[in-house]
Each structure stands twice: as structure tokens, then as C-alpha cells.
Amino acid sequence: MADPATYRPAPGEIPDSPGVYRFRDEHGRVVYVGKAKSLRQRLSSYFQDLANLHPRTQQMVTTAASVQWTVVGTEVEALALEYSWIKEFDPRFNVKYRDDKSYPYLAVTMAEEFPRVQVLRGTKRAGTRYFGPYAHAWAIRETVDLLLRVFPVRTCSAGVFRRAAQQGRPCLLGYIDKCSAPCVGRITPDDHRALAQDFCDFMAGDTARFTRRLTARMKEAAADLDYERAARLRDDIATLETAMQKNAVVLPDGTEADVFALSGDELEAAVQVFHVRDGRIRGQRGWVVEKVEDVTDAELVEHLLQQVYGGEDVQAGAVPREVLVPELPPEVEQVEAWLSGLRGSRVHVRVPQRGDKRELAATVRKNAEHALALHRTRRAGDLTTRSQALREIQEALDLPTAPLRIECYDVSHNQGTYQSASMVVFEDGMARKSEYRLFTVRGPEGEGARDDTAAMHEVITRRFRRYLADRAASGEAELGLGGDGDDEEGLRSGPVDADTGRPTRFAYPPNLVVVDGGPPQVAAAAAALAELGVDDVALCGLAKRLEEVWLPGEEYPVILRRGSEGLYLLQRLRDEAHRFAITAHRKRRSKGMTVSVLDDVPGLGPARQAALLRHFGSVKRLRLASLEEIATVPGMGERTAAAVVAALRGTGEPPAGPLPGPVPDAGTVSDTPVV
């Protein structure tokens, strides 16, 4: 625990200007990011008597070891930079918004030649139009099933589309007129794209135009006494009206707004938003917020707007004309200016006071209250279990603190070949997959390690040597790792460039290292750490046979109770490291088994390799061919033919005599396998 007075900058060093600041811990990891209208006033508030600070602020300033800041021109720039830093560094003391579920979207892949309508979740893709999010996937499918009668756009996968095109026969939807069957040429690509665009326009709220168009066509058909066509158009109009009724009108037509609501306490809060377009609720979304910093509801709203509208995947036009919130952000003018810049026109941020908008806001708040109650029901056991697991590991291994960051290592190979190793990271008892790492075990001769212990020694050495190098490159003292503790070389407070300073993840040491194995593997890892002078990282091994926990230099293992949460967490770590390592090993092995001897021939690319194999049928026949015969293959020259002969026979001299037997025609497959 650090004393804030040890890294407090002099008041005269801090500019009295708008800017963004970040607190870092002793390892250089960013733990908190904030913005201020006046950096001097805001930062001074952190360095007062600890008794006057909020408990969470106390924990933050005592965890930090330095503070840095960047001066910007306006408060709007500070808002944007604060969001980008929070997204980049993921500080542990900043408010974190987590989706309470992965909401489904209705997506139209307009970037494809034949656009496809489908339900998607997760990261948005370029060239795809999204509608939603929706609370349930079945609600999207019901709407799509209705609209396909009027807008028969393709919904099949790429494989089904190709198979139908090859067979010349459409799928079932093509026969029941719920697909225009572009796979068999019933509609041109341009007409199908226009149909998909009409579908998008209808989903975007331009519904009256299509109703009027179908009504006019129905009257024309009735006037021409084509009653069957008029009846079909009548049914299409009824279908559109049914689809429109599924999104109930809650506000006057033309209303475009996002309605936010909060419900929570001092520790966490639930957030809900209703997306209203053309007076109808087009989607709903929710988050759960852990209040790891001392924030008011107004500041929480500001962070929320950054989260919703500041992401890279936010589409153009996603910012509505009106944003209705439960409380105005502290700097509402700057927030409105920022949102207006994103939208390209004026955006108003308001608190609804009366009428339909206030009633809708009350409905959104009820949804937030229900979401918070559901989250607490699901989460209570999980939080308790993870905390108990870390506490059991701390007590069993006699650690000074709970191991909040644990790294686990495993080695995978096949009789010594394609040796691969994995590093998986768990923080606060949960997997942090963005920090997983893979190692290719090389060994002293570059051909792999002699056994598992040598491989483990190499992996631990490489990981912590990189850690020490990153610490040295950043100019920070190696606290507890052999450094002299000189404050002049340690963490220092001061200004930092907004475009630099990205932390290196390998510079973060774990609290505990777990290796997959027993005493030999633990001894190898302990030797690697000792050789590097790393003495402040705990180490243990988990033997698979009896699930024993081995400590360095101990004659007997530590036995954790079967069914204990601590043992379960270590097993999850070990199994995840094993899965990650064996996946990498299989990938390398598959790639190695498909390597051809022709890959090493200089100037011989995939196209020329394919041409040679088509001409000669196999590598065996190619090895017996003369230089002149190889040079006659289309695309080959004498120099490349000589390189092929030298690579296959170890000499550049062509063999004497013709090929034995007839040469297979192009496309003939020989019985001799290609190696």
C-alpha cells in the first residue's frame, strides 16, 4: 500500500487547464482514468487527508504509485480522450459496463452480391445494416417470417446457396415464395439488392410508403378484374400491418429518442435503454455497472453515454435527435456538443418532466429494477464462490494476499515434436483471454527441448525475462527484483503524450504461477525464476494423478479438500492451459504434416507447384524427371527447373533418360502420396 504523499506532484507542476489524468500502480498498470475542467483542482482533491476521502477513492490512491496527465484544448476533447483511455487500459477502479446478455440484432449483409437477412450477435461487421437490439431472437424471426412474404430476400447460408446454385433447384423457401431464389437466377443481382434495400427501409421506419404502394397495386388489379392478384396484395398489406403492430406506438410519429434509466445502490446499478424510432420501440438493451469508483448518478449517466455512443462499432445515424436520461450529466453542454458532432446535427439531452415521455421513462426504470434483481440473484453465488476460492488458495499456500492474478503454464507435444506451451491468465478468479500467450519451445539447438522440465524452464525463463526487459525499457525500478530502490529511477508523476504510453502486458507480474505437473516441473520453474532473480512471485504445481498441489523444495504436497472451491479454481486453470496448449500443438502439427518438399524451392510459389503436380502426377515422378522436361511445364523456366532438380535430388544435374512409363494427364491423381 503506497502513501499518496510519495508521488504527489508539486501544485505548480499541474496546469490549470482541461485535461485527462491516469493513476498507475507500482507495475505501471493504469488503475484509474479521469477528466477534469481544471487538472490542478481535480488532482489536488485526491491528495488530501485520507480520512476525508471516500473508501473506494482511498483504495485507489493507495494502490496507485504515480499519476500522469495530458492537457487538451476543450472539455469535449477531454471527454473523447477519457473514453479512449478507459477502453484501451481497462482500469480496475473505473466504472465497468457489462451487457447483461448478448442481445440479438436483425442484420442485412448489404456488402454481399446477394444480401442476406439473418440474426446476429456480438461484434458488428462492416457493410452490414443492423436493426435492434431485440430482447429475444424469436421476436426477430417472427417479424422476418412475416416480411418475407412481401420482401422475399435471401435468408440461407453461403453453403446452402452454393449447393442450390449447383443443383439448379432452390430450397423450400423458394418454392413457397418466401425467397426470390437468386441462387437459380429467378431475380437479377440488382433487383435482389433493391428488394433488400426496401426491406431495410421498412425496418428503419419508412412503412407508409410500402403500404400505399401495395394499396395502389391492389386497386389496379381489382380494376383489371385480376381478383387473385388483388387478394394476394390484400394479404401482403395485412402482413405489413401485422409487422408494424408488433412494435407498439408509444410516442408521436417521427419521435426519435433513446430513453435511459438507472436503478441501484452504492455498489452496483442496472441500466436500461429503449431505442425509440418513428414513435415505436425498436430495441432494448441493458447493462450492469459495478461502482468501483465514487460516482454520482449524473456522472454515471455521462459514462453511460460514452459507452453507448463512443464505440467503434456504432453506425452512422445511431445517435438520435433526443436522449432522455434520469439525470443530466455534470457538463451537459459538452456532452451535447460531443453527441452533435457524432450525429452531424443537433442532439438534445433532457430529463423528461411530463407526458408520454415521462411515462415511458418510468417503464424503462421498472425494467432496470427487474434487471438488477435478476442480476443479484444470478451473481450472488458467483461472487461468493470466486472470493472463497481465492481465499482458500491464499491460506493453503500461505500467501500474504489473495492471488488476484494467476498465470498457469502447460507444455504439449507429440513424442517431442511440435513442442508448444501455453500461458493462461485468470484475474479475480475469471479468465482474461486477451492476455493468453503461446510459446513455441525451441530448445538450445532450435529443435525443441529434451523433456518437459527443460521445456517448462525455457517457457518460464522467456516469460519473466521479457517481463524484466519491459520493466527496464519503461525506465521503472524493478521493485523487489534486485533493483536499488532509487526513487529517481522509479515511478514518477508528470505529463504524458496522449498518443504514447501504452502498457506492455508482459510487464504485469502475476501473484501466483501454476505449472501443470509435479515436483520436476515445479523445480524447473523455480530454477528459472531464481536464475532471473524473481523472488516475489509465488509458485506451485498441480499434479494430475491425485490433484496434489506441490510447492518448490517441499517433500510433501499440499492437499486441498475434494470439492473445495480453491481446488476447483486450480483445476479450471490447469484444464484451460492444457486446452490452449494442445490446440496450438495440433495446429502446428497439422500444418507441418501438410508441408511439401517443394515449399523450400526458391521462386516456386503455390501456382507453379500445382502446375508441376498436375503435369507429373506426384513428387516421385517429378524427382525422376529431367531438367528439360520440368522446364517445358507452363510457367516454368530453366532457372526455376534447375532449382527444383537441386532441391529434389540434391544436385543441379538432370537425370539421364526419359521418365519410366507414361506421364499422367493433367488432373490425374497418382497412387504415390505427395509429401
Image (cartoon, rainbow, N blue to C red):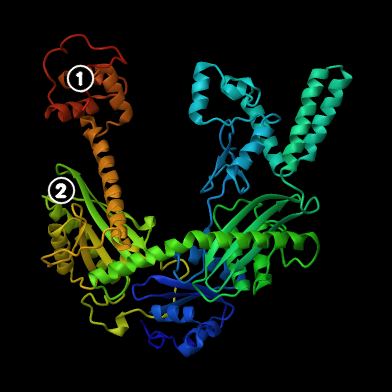
Q: Quadrant of residue 529?
A: bottom left
Within-10-Å neighbours for mark 1: few <14, some 14–19, many 20+? few
Residue pushed farthest top? 662
Residue 75 drawn at (x, y percent): 61, 73
Marking on residue 334 = none
Mark 2 is on which residue type? Gly
Q: Quadrant of the N terminus?
A: bottom left
Residue 70 drawn at (x, y percent): 49, 74
Residue pushed farthest right? 223
- The residue under label 1 is 672
Residue 630 drawn at (x, y percent): 23, 20
Mark 1 is on which residue type? Thr
Marking on residue 448 = 2
Going by the image, does 350 lie left or right of 410?
Answer: right
Going by the image, does 236 lie left or right of 536?
Answer: right
Q: Residue at x 78, y 54 (%)?
A: 251
Residue 74 visible in this rendered orientation of the protein: no
| Upstream in sequence: badge 2 or badge 1 | 2
Q: Quadrant of the C terminus?
A: top left
Instruction: Compute the Cα span from label 2 to label 1.
Output: 31 Å
Residue 146 visible in this rendered orientation of the protein: yes
Q: Secondary structure at mark 2?
A: loop
Going by the image, does 44 lie left or right of 424?
Answer: right
Q: Secondary structure at mark 1?
A: loop
The one of 537 and 493 positioned closer to us in this rendering: 537
Residue 16 drawn at (x, y percent): 56, 83
Q: Residue at x 15, y 66 (%)?
A: 552
Q: Residue at x 60, y 62 (%)?
A: 271
614 in relation to 498, above or below: above
